[in-house]
Image: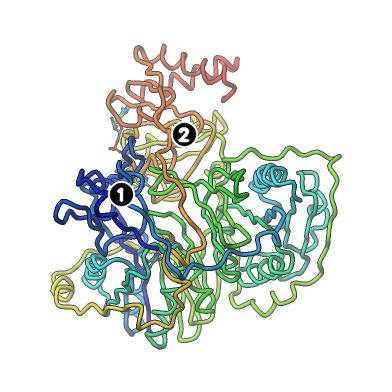
Amino acid sequence: MNIVVCIKQVPDTTKVKINPETNTLIREGVESIINPFDHYAIEEAVRLKEAHGGTVKVMTMGPPQAETALREAVSLGADEAYLVSDRAFAGSDTWSTAYTLAAAIRNLGDTDLILCGKQAIDGDTAQVGPSLADQLDIPFVAFVRKVRTITDTELVVERVFEEGYEVVQSPLPALITVVKEINEPRLPSLKGKMKAKKCEIVMVSRSELEVEDPYLGLDGSPTRVVKIFSPDLKRAGEKLEGEPQDIAEKLVRNLRDQKLI
Amino acid sequence: MAVVVIKNQCDGCEVCLDSCPYDAIEMIDGVAYINEKCTLCMACLEACPVEAIISEESETELPELEKDAYSGVWVFAEQRQGKISSVVAELLGAGRKLADAQGQKLTAVLFGHEMEPSARDLVHYGADEVIYVDDPILAQFNDGPYASVLSDLIEKRRPGIVLAGATFMGRSFIPSVASRISTGLTADCTALDIDPETGDLLQTRPAFGGNIMATIICPRHRPQMATVRHKVLTPAVRDIHHKGEVHIINGAGNGRIDEKTQVLEVVEEIMDTVNLAEADIIVSGGRGLRDSEGFKLIEELAVLLGGAVGASRSAVDSEWIPYSHQVGQTGKTVQPKLYIACGISGAVQHLAGMQSSDVIVAINKDPDAPIFDVSTYGLVGDLFQIIPQIIKSVKVQRGEV
Ligand SMILES: Cc1cc2nc3c(=O)[nH]c(=O)nc-3n(C[C@H](O)[C@H](O)[C@H](O)COP(=O)(O)OP(=O)(O)OC[C@H]3O[C@@H](n4cnc5c(N)ncnc54)[C@H](O)[C@@H]3O)c2cc1C
Ligand SMILES: Nc1ncnc2c1ncn2[C@@H]1O[C@H](COP(=O)(O)O)[C@@H](O)[C@H]1O
């Protein structure tokens, strides 16, 4: 079984802050990590390989430093790593990202299953997976919490929705996006770390892809960010201190006055 | 497009270095230089005090499209088991304002089977027109047919704006619709507006786990598509006197050949309390509850107030409560009218999922806990003493004791 996992390197959002004067992101001390949801995609791919044989290829589109994310994926069990990187791809929105990734995946030859994370924690869009499946013209199932069965020709998965889950069957090749419940990712093994150090990262640039310039990067992206600002979340909150009974009563009175309870 | 520095305008102040989230600016000979790590986020443009950094358009830009050929605001009226979802009234409320701002029509689009009365009822929520596609294969959500039928309708009728709920359904199939018709899509919006100058839809949404807000436009493509977060926009009020046309289309047409995936079974998991996304009140517990016994107290308060139970990741990881209750970056994003955080410190990842709630109450014994920074009411003290008092006080005020 040929499996491709699409991963994204993202800033560790715990540390992203905005400069109140310029309204721009402060990069100081922001580390890059593999998008947390993509860890589950890598783990699921490696488990499927262990159970059914095959290879796991990880692919990311991003700047040269995204190489570290790929090496980490190899340490977690992926076999091959592809870095789709070119200045022509900079500024891509989800549409152009999916367009470019689709071209790069086509070059890999036969693929049975593509895994993506549910969403990336920087943009929180959850759009690249479904869009990628459309560009490749293959079926997809988003928000998968369990792969029930898989054969050479089809898979059956559980997809979550607000009130529960649906059991969905799809022919292969297909794409799935996975949620956190799907598995418990392993930590890298010593052997994995050694492999990651030596592993060749295959560089994929603009010239190797069958793509058209007007659809690439920022120019090819239908959407544009016109403004960023920090949300006004700090509240001039009221601190209630004192005896539990007094502050509880005061709170309940306030909430009732505002017809909240 | 490229970001470049006008060399003789740069005074070497280095302000841009700190503004770049990607470490893509270096100083070379006292002048800023943008290296290959640049992702064109444009943060440095705003930061530069002497306007020495500019963006250059390149010649490969797509041509401006015939915007006038696209008009009207569409709302996708999601249904499950024949019941229209509550997010639809919110979409129609927002859609009405956008349509009025442009002097255009508001259309609701419904897919299903044997749902004509529901289709007609959408008019009462402000739709001027309802397009109802009736086919047994549309009775239940399935990505292929839904994406195919909606794409075909959009291509034929050319709306200017298409809105859908940022629900599991909307976030699953709407991206493939946008991809198919090659237009932009903005996920999970929390505010929508029309730019009075350009007529473009201003789509505002949280990013980076809610730490920043971004306003996004789709200037050269139509329609402009957005999924909208549940519980944020004001729902349309039902008015049985509102009039509109209902068009019924029988048969999914091309949608049938797109039925690649099959839904074999739908399992609704029994929830002991209200669905988190739908709840107006959420009482949430964290590590401060000490053990699963602690959650009994939270549940008691939630039941008393008619609310749902939420949790921090620490509480979930300790297996005091299932993951489906987790609020935050890797859990659910909620925006109730009232959020009561008990024994939760307020880590950014937790805040990301709840900080836009209308009123936030925090109960924590540490007066410096970060949760207090986002709280409307901060109760400093032991939750095991305070919560029973709140329960008692609510009962007293209701005359139940
Ligand atoms: C990639 C990533 C994703 C994450 N996603 C999420 C997410 O989705 N959701 C989430 O919640 N977290 C998430 N986290 C974890 C997050 O960083 C915090 O670890 C977590 O939210 C802390 O939970 P807590 O507030 O319950 O526990 P703690 O931080 O331990 O806080 C417990 C609080 O209870 C108070 N307390 C203790 N006893 C009492 C008492 N008797 N009365 C009153 N107060 C008391 C303490 O003062 C303290 O403030 C994520 C972390 C990472 C790295
Ligand atoms: N630049 C990228 N390179 C590879 N995979 C990506 C990239 N961006 C997004 N993805 C994949 O698509 C998923 C959803 O991302 P997003 O649509 O940005 O929220 C991620 O979890 C990744 O699996």
Q: Position of residue B95 (x, y in %)?
A: 68, 47
For the point 55% across and 43% down, which residue is it? B191
Compared with residue A121, is residue B340 higher up or lower down, i.e. above or below? above
Q: Mark 2 points at which residue?
A: B283
* Chain of residue at mark 1: B
Q: Is mark 1 within 8 Å of ligand 2?
A: no
At a point 32% along the width and 67% down the height, the residue shown is A62
Vertically, is B211 above or below A117?
above
**B76 lies left or right of B343:** right
Q: Which class describes the residues within 10 Å of circle 1: few (<14), some (14-19), or many (20+)? A: some
Which residue is depicted at the point 58% across and 41% down? B231
**Which quadrant of the frame does ligand 1 lie within?**
top left
Q: Position of residue A120 (x, y in %)?
A: 39, 58
Is residue B126 something that shows in the picture?
A: yes
| Residue A237 sits in quarter | top left
In three-dimensional space, the C-alpha distance between marks 2 and 1, rounded to whole angstroms, equals 50 Å
In this view, B98 is above or below A222: above
Subunit bearing disc 2: B
State the image quarter where residue B232 is shown: top right
Q: Viewed as shown, does residue B186 lie left or right of B138? A: left
**Closest to the observer, A179 or A220:** A220
Q: In this view, does A258 lie to the left or right of B109?
A: left
Residue situated furthest front in the rendering: B8
- Residue B298 position, x and y percent, is 44, 33
Picture coordinates of residue A47, whole percent (x, y): 33, 74
What kind of residue is marked 2? Val
The residue tagged 1 is: B52
Can you tell which mark lies on residue A72?
Answer: none
